[in-house]
Image (cartoon, rainbow, N blue to C red):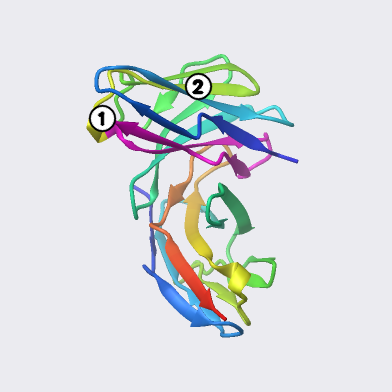
Amino acid sequence: GDSVTQMEGPVTLSEEAFLTINCTYTATGYPSLFWYVQYPGEGLQLLLKATKADDKGSNKGFEATYRKETTSFHLEKGSVQVSDSAVYFCALTGGGADGLTFGKGTHLIIQP
Amino acid sequence: GAVVSQHPSRVICKSGTSVKIECRSLDFQATTMFWYRQFPKQSLMLMATSNEGSKATYEQGVEKDKFLINHASLTLSTLTVTSAHPEDSSFYICSASIGGPYEQYFGPGTRLTVT
């Protein structure tokens, strides 16, 4: 079956540092890829998505590129802020009416 | 827009009783709703997919007689945990699809504790 593997945290960085959270996947066909973020006490929110190979999703300074050749969708941000502290989930789905397959989540802690 | 609510946010029940969790899409009609379960420090696991007016589709290993899902309208789906046991204690999260491809909106989750 489909699966998503992401680096486990917690990941602790200083403010303004460069962020990379690795995500790789296995799936049949051509999945769509997502990053969700969960702030403390809140529900999951879609951060960005990419629906086909070489697409780049971006939002709030975060970016991720759908790399079919390496089956990866790494999340990056050039300069993190304290407010970026949250749990980040990489996920995939095979189709519009399908549920999501999630990675285990990466807890990101940004220190001032 | 695209807000999903869950009720209750926390519930404690005794072993052997049943608990109902509601998931509502507040400002849109959801053709499909999903139920997930999240264990501590682990990923969300899809339990079932429900479409309005039809039976839910359960993932492998999820007992459909234990986790009853009803999707009676385009804005409401319910998950009933029947004859709950301590091992059912978990964080249950629903999401709703607005009808467009691949977009799901998540509720804040319900923490169930079975004593």
Circle 1 or circle 2, nearest the eye: 1
Q: Which residues are magenta?
A: B88-115
Compared to A78, does A98 lie above or below? above
Quadrant for the C terminus of chain B in the image: top left
Is residue A35 toward the left or the right of residue A57 in the image?
Answer: left
Is residue A51 toward the left or the right of residue A109 in the image?
Answer: right
Tell me if residue A68 can be seen: yes
Which element is circle 1 on?
loop
A68 inside magenta stretch: no
Mark 1 and mark 2 in contact? Answer it, CB < 8 Å: no
Packing grade of label 1 (10 A; few <14, some 14-19, many >=20) is few
Who's the residue at 41% across and 30% down the image? B11
Who's the residue at 43% across and 74% down the image? A11
In terms of image quadrants, where is residue B113? Answer: top left
Q: Chain of mark 1?
A: B
Give the labeled residue for mark 1: B115
Quadrant for the N terminus of chain B in the image: top right
Camera-nearest residue between A107 and B48: A107
Q: Earlier in the sequence, mark 1 or mark 2?
A: 2
Camera-nearest residue between A60 and A43: A43
Residue A2 placement (x, y as % from top left): 38, 50
Who's the residue at 43% across and 48% down the image? A101
Q: Which mark identifies residue B78?
A: 2
Is residue B113 toward the left or the right of residue B76 in the image?
Answer: left
Which element is circle 2 on?
strand
Q: Amino acid at mark 1?
A: Thr
Q: Chain of mark 2?
A: B
